[in-house]
Amino acid sequence: MVEQYDLAIIGAGPGGYVAAIRAAQLGLKTVCIDKRKELGGTCLNVGCIPSKALLQSSEYYYKALHEFKTHGIESPSVSCNLQQMMKRKTEILSSFNLGIAGLFKKNKVQHIVGSASFTSPHTLLVTGGVAPQEIAARFILIATGSEPIALPFLPFDEKRILSSTGALSLDVVPRKMLVIGAGVIGVELGSVYSRLGSEVTFIEFFPRICPTLDESLSKELLSCLQKQGMQFHLASKVVAATVGQTEVTLQVTLPNHVTQEMSGDVVLVCIGRKPYTQGLNLDKAGITPTEKGFIPITSSFRTRAPHIFAIGDLVDGPMLAHKASEEGVAVAEIIAEHTPKIEYMAIPNVVYTHPEVASVGLSEKEAQDAGLQTKTGSFPFKASSKAKCAQEEEGFVKIVVETKTERIIGVHIIGAHAAELIAQGALAIQNKLTLSEIINTPYAHPTFSEALKEAALAVMGRAIHK
């Protein structure tokens, strides 16, 4: 017997499970299908959450070694227990897996474990679970996310050649780690093992790290990570590799066109991610991905088949968990005949290194390329009393403003708590706030957030503490 639903969702990541809950809230009979038994997708199980758990643990360890003594906190010895760090990480994941399962139960979302494939535009076959199941739905949402990209000559084995997934479950701290790609995922995971004692070297194809960031943030982040002991080879390319029993040797072409050998215990490959559509049989639904594997959609997330939607990493745009969640909610509301609107310019991007980096809106260059007349202001955390008390003086806040309207169109932060502070920038852009509305808002003292007000004042040449 074929089970009938209003909405069938393929994928239980931050796009799929959030869409399922919102759809159920709106009265739709909803099923969410995922090949993993554990809910939460890549983000929760092998992405955002485990990496942040390890980043937090490794940051505490690093501070205990290098900073606590300044605060008058002394210990005869500090050691790293990697197994305990990994155990804590696993416990966090398990608690959230159970939490989402509880939310599904509360909202009456049906959860099926297995791999879904189209058999027709309205029907799915689910295999790999207890028994094959046929599902029919008026609407279908594809939210299967993405997977790491491997180099053709360096396939992942998750022992010596690591994807981000393998890097989250190492048994020992490598003596030397080579990281191919100094984008967001690379610098985060490289930071974890650098703090724990690895000698970490990055090889980045582009002339700067995290190239999607405002250039001033990218430059400052590079300086901060170098001070922590990480090494970088920019504008460089890995052209060959030899995988041995105890180490991996890379052939790297440097900017001067000289090829140099670099060796490490492990190599972490972070050159990007690609949409995951394996086994979906999209042709049976009349859907053809692009050359890069993305599913083409309309502005309302509809594929070529109007009753089938796609969101998140499967579609063009930044691969961010919170973007996928916003899109999932929007799809559920569209099906329920609401009229949601996502302001993509207000979606923030965060790098969870130390210091943290966060951006929302347009960079100064993006604004100029768009033909906008802009003015900017910045404020350094070294002039913040709270940052000095917390021994977190690295970084700054930068605000980009459209000259004519004085509307805030970009906020860029590098410094402690940047991931939390950026919400103010997102709120300003979402609501089209102007410079004066930030300047005229009272901020508590002493706080890190005062730096946003000072940066806004700096745009007008009125910064008080700079």
Image (tube, rainbow, N blue to C red):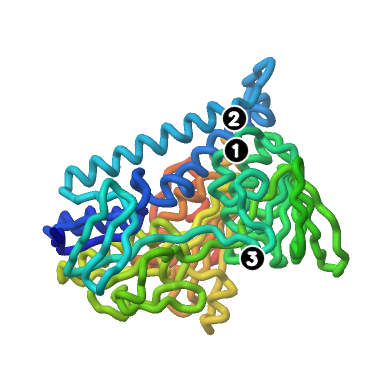
Instruction: Say which element carries label 2.
Output: helix
Q: Amino acid at mark 3?
A: Glu
Percent across and percent down for residue 435 are: 44, 66
Give the label, 2 or 1, closer to the camera.
1
Furthest residue to the bottom?
371
Residue 287 vertical placement versus 269 (above, below)? below
Q: Residues within 10 Å of mark 3 (few under 14, many from 20)?
A: some
Q: Name the one closer to the observer, 457 or 236.
A: 236
Q: Is 296 above or below relative to 320?
A: below
The front one of 446 and 326 is 326
Where is residue 445 shown, x and y percent of the image? Answer: 46, 42
The answer to which of marks 2 and 1 sits earlier in the sequence is 2
Of marks 2 and 3, which one's residue comes earlier in the chain? Answer: 2
Q: Is residue 465 above or below residue 59?
A: below
Find disc 3 in the rendering and name its residue. Answer: 215
Determine the residue positioned at 65% across, 64% down. 152
Check if mark 2's residue and mark 1's residue have beta carbons within 8 Å: yes
Count neighbours of disc 2 (C-alpha within 10 A) and say few if under 14, some if 14 to 19, many if 20 or more: some
- The residue indicated by pointer 1 is 170
Q: Quadrant of the C terminus?
A: bottom right
Residue to which mark 2 is pinned: 82
